[in-house]
Amino acid sequence: MIAFVIIIALYHTVETALAHATGCYHTMTQLDTSHLDPTVSVTVRPSVNVVALLGRLPLNRELHLPNDTLVLDSGASHHMVKDASLFDAWHTRSHVAVDGAGGSLMAQGTGSITIRTSKQRTIKLCNIYYVPDLPANLISVMQLRRERVYTHFGKTIELRSQGQLIGVASLIANQLSTLDATPIRSTVSPVAAAAIPLLTLHQRFGHLSLPNLRRAVSSGQLQGQTWTYSAAECKAFSCDTCKATKATRTPFPTSDSRASQPLELVHSDVLTLPEPATDGERYVVTFIDDFSRKTWVSALRNKSQVFDTFQRWHAMIERSTGLKLRTLRTDNGGEYTSKAFIEYCSLHGITRQLTIPYTPEQNGRAERTNRTIVEGTIALLQHSGLPMTLWREALRYVVDTKNLSPHSAIDHKIPDTIWYGKPPSTANLRAFGCRAWHTTPRHKRAKLDPKAKPFIFVGIENKTKAWTLYDPETTLFFQSRDVRFDENVFPARDAPTGQPKPRATSTAGDWTFVDAAHGSRTVPRLSLPPVVHENRFAALETDASDDATIEMSDDGFDTPSDMSMAQFSLSPPASDVTDDSADPIDFLSCPSRAAAFAATTADSPVVELEGPTEDPQNWSQAVKSGKEEIWRQAAADEFHSLTTEYKCFTPVDSSSLPPGAKVLGSRFIFRTKRDQLGKITSHKGRLVAQGFSQRPGIDYDETFAPVAKFTSIRALIALAAAKKLHVHQADVDKAYLHGELKEDLYMRVPQGVDMPGKVLKLHRSIYGLKQAGRVWNEHIDLTLKSLHYRATAKDHCVYVRRDGDHYHYIALYVDDLLMVSPSEDEIERILNGLEQKYGIKRLGPAQYILGIQIKRQADKSIILSQEAYITSILRRFGMSDSSPASTPMAPNRQLEHSLAETSKTARTRYMQAIGCLLYAATGTRPDISYAVGYLARFSASPTPEHWTAIKTVFRYLRGTARLGLHYSSEQGKFSGFTGYSDADWGTCTTSSRSTMGYSFHLAGSVISWSSKVQNRVADSTTDAEYLALSHASKEAGHLQELLMELGIDTRAPVQLYGDNQGAIALAKNPTLHHRSRHIRIREHFVRDQVRLGTIQVDYVDTKTMVADIFTKALGPLVFKVHRDNLGLRG
């Protein structure tokens, strides 16, 4: 006898209906009052318009009642049942909206159920709505009354019909009563198939093939599904998505051998995905149990994480099963053959089976699994319309459904059934990518707010028994158990084309949780002390985990005494707490102080650039920015990554610090990442140390860290264009964090992270430390050398490798890598080698580096430009709609220094403009070098006249933003490099010094240039020109040796042109007379190079002297001629 619990609702009012169902219900026999039979048929009269109403029972209340429980609700308009197995008759109807205290649900049809009471009465309840998301089965007091069944309340609760007692329930507590009865179930539930269209069931199982779908449902190995589809339905079944994504291919060769028990043999492989996931993952490691064919997967950012992932999986799987892993079969990839991996397997008694290189058939089961997973993932994404960046969520759902699907190698049994020894439930399966209505808790919405909000279903979180939802507006993921689904609607299919891609976020299992009492929200969570995170794998154990975790709210949390490290929450700052400390990292590529200053925030009337200046400068601004959840998640991702993945620090008690230890400050820095077109790609949070308080000799020693010079990068691009080489790009994720510290350093917990009484002991070179750049450079230098690359002597961040007659190059700029090679196989070898140690983002053919766009033309020539950057600074300073100027500065214009006091606002605005223009002038726009250098002299006290001159430069860029350096692919233009040198005598009205400049050309465009004031007064034009030749000859020697190291034969003298015969004669003839005796020894550098035969100085007419553009402001016609000769093209 099973007791039926009846909850008696105290409220008798009914809420307004949300929807109506239309259609004629068939006539049913009314209760016969003259011949009362032990079998009483309780019926509903025919009705055209039926409104399903729910009483005051909260829809989001966890009742924890058995599935066959009946709840009596005095406010419900009709009977409603959530358990499909109770039905013995079923009729599909139009969906009806069910409104209740906790929100709205959807009824999927009607039917009848039969129960036998303790009074030996068989009661058949008809016209019952099937509402699968209902918290409990409901019996309507109103409907019973309409059917002339009355409820009498006394010491016991009695159900009477025609005066006869047909059922008894006893009041046991508050509103609870029990009815002694036993259910009479049909052997086959008529709802299982009829309520779910065949195509929907196919989608729920991740587009499983129809034969396997039928085997899975009809085999009795799954709970919650039965197969009642007709042969005609099966014959007519068609799925366009499967036709497009699962084309038939030649099968892999099969093997009849099979392990005799779980974990006797496990197959593993690493799968590479074509596009990074939301967290930057590009790889998937799979583990397949040979006996059960159960599969586990985990998404990885780089292959170096395979070993760590295997260790966690191994510990989890042996703990949950009590069995030992005996044999692991993998390929010969470096991720599986490292010394650490081999030693670990030996220590734990795991036998290794390695396949022969280039014979993936020997690990065929892993290969077949990869194929199945990839095809299923593509099918889900294509059918749902979701972007490829959500492949991680789709892949996990594919694996979940694969473990619920029959496998031919195990006699069409289901992996999860074999693994767990019992039929798994399919109740939580839904069509991937369908619309999911999340019920907003009452306390989180206003009276007029809608009760539910639409999201997109993207997976199941087995550990929390919740569904994973995706919000396309905020691009965040979260879990919820209060969801109703519309599996015929897929919102992403009709999403606007401009919809942003999902932002990077942590794996849902590690970071997102559901608070059953307060609904769902996205809040970081950290499970500590470090244990195996079982829920990082798609196939999860259903047993309760012993991981100690706390689900936190905004109100804080209590720390358990047995935790060695505190949980944290990203809490909003107190209103009286601010963080006004200086930003220790400028996050800019500008190579000078002025350029870095260009990004600072000032109280300025100029229009701010969309980028650094619109981002919050501290935690307080982040939580008030209107993007609070986005910045919170960015900070959470960063802190979690530093803690668990990179192990950058360990929380320790502040009371345990050694005497004299200095605790550095810390803070989050927030940045909006953009692509080469200026479009937002992601939001990033970076935790940095405030290293300005470090003490030299105690907290750090050396700090210098080299970066590739712009001149070297342009030389490599010119070389790539002329020789038609491949140019690819990659960057290292969190590069600084790979370097280990030698010093003992401590850092405060950043604002927004709640760790009372703790400080962070640093183990790695976190951003902001003075030595961080140097430590990272030493680390990457060793890695590149291990790949047989050597740093050039002329630029320590340009690496070269010679392979016979071929040369391969790598340029390193902090964490950005530019790879230039005649062989794409060599580039792949570099990336594979780097991925063994770092998280590498493969960016493919280079398009955008250091703010410079790289455009490969059809003829293999290359254009370097800063169009996007120039457009952004024009917008920042309100010059986007200004009228274009023909030159950056008017000829013969002379500006004077002002002695008047200039406001801080004016000085800040002026220096910001100079900084931004300097970056363009040193990157790809040599044509503005003179104007910017000249105007920079007035930064201390700029006047309105100076600002007008700045605006002229902006106006010139407004009309020429598309110009870039064009490096030709014609071999005839790569016979060597040539230089031009010029000077304008005594043009500085303040110091009477001369301005000199040079340019060096390779592959049809300039690779190096300079415009600067000489460091002493020249007494004649010849003297000024001679100083300019010496200045240019030093750069010529540097470029000659650099190109020699890059494999270019530069033994012939460098051709250097000047336009002053006296200076050329002085360089060629070692004479000493009264007009040259004042020249210092070091200023005779050009003469010495001419004597050694490394430089050939010749005359060129002033009209064709390209370097003239670096010494003075020119008129439009002459300026355009020289600009074209620099290789600037539109």
Image (cartoon, rainbow, N blue to C red):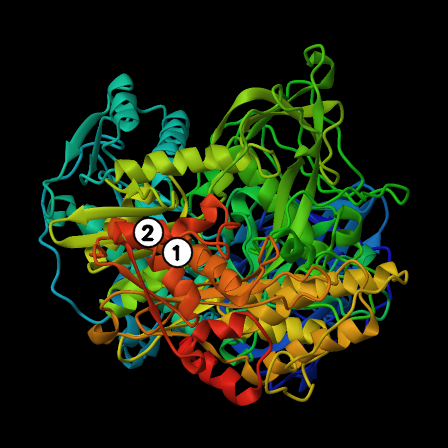
Q: Looking at the image, do the residues carrying marks 1 and 2 touch, with CB atoms under 8 Å apart?
A: yes
For the point 59% across and 43% down, which residue is it? 638
Nearer to me, 730 or 720: 720
Q: Is residue 967 left or right of residue 502?
A: left
Q: For residue 748, what is the image quadrant?
A: top right
Q: Amino acid at mark 2?
A: Gln
Q: Quadrant of the N terminus?
A: top right
Q: For residue 899, what is the image quadrant?
A: bottom right
State the image coordinates of residue 537 (x, y, percent, origin top left). 42, 43
For the point 91% across and 42% down, which residue is it? 576
Residue at disc 2, secondary structure: helix
Residue at disc 1, secondary structure: helix
Q: Earlier in the sequence, mark 1 or mark 2?
A: 1
State the image coordinates of residue 318 (x, y, percent, origin top left). 36, 26
Q: Gap between marks 1 and 2, in whole Å?
A: 8 Å
State the image coordinates of residue 775 (x, y, percent, origin top left). 48, 32
Q: Nearer the viewer, mark 1 or mark 2?
A: 2
**Location of residue 864 with respect to 635 vertically, above or below:** below
- Residue that extends furthest to the front in the rendered view of this protein: 1074
From where the camera sits, is residue 959 visible? yes
Q: Amino acid at mark 1?
A: Ser
Q: Residues within 10 Å of mark 2 (few under 14, many from 20)?
A: many
Please give the label number shown on residue 1089. 2
Tally of numbered tags: 2
Q: Quadrant of the C terminus?
A: bottom left
Q: Is residue 1078 left or right of residue 842?
A: right
Please give the label number shown on residue 1006. none
Pointer 1: what residue? 1033
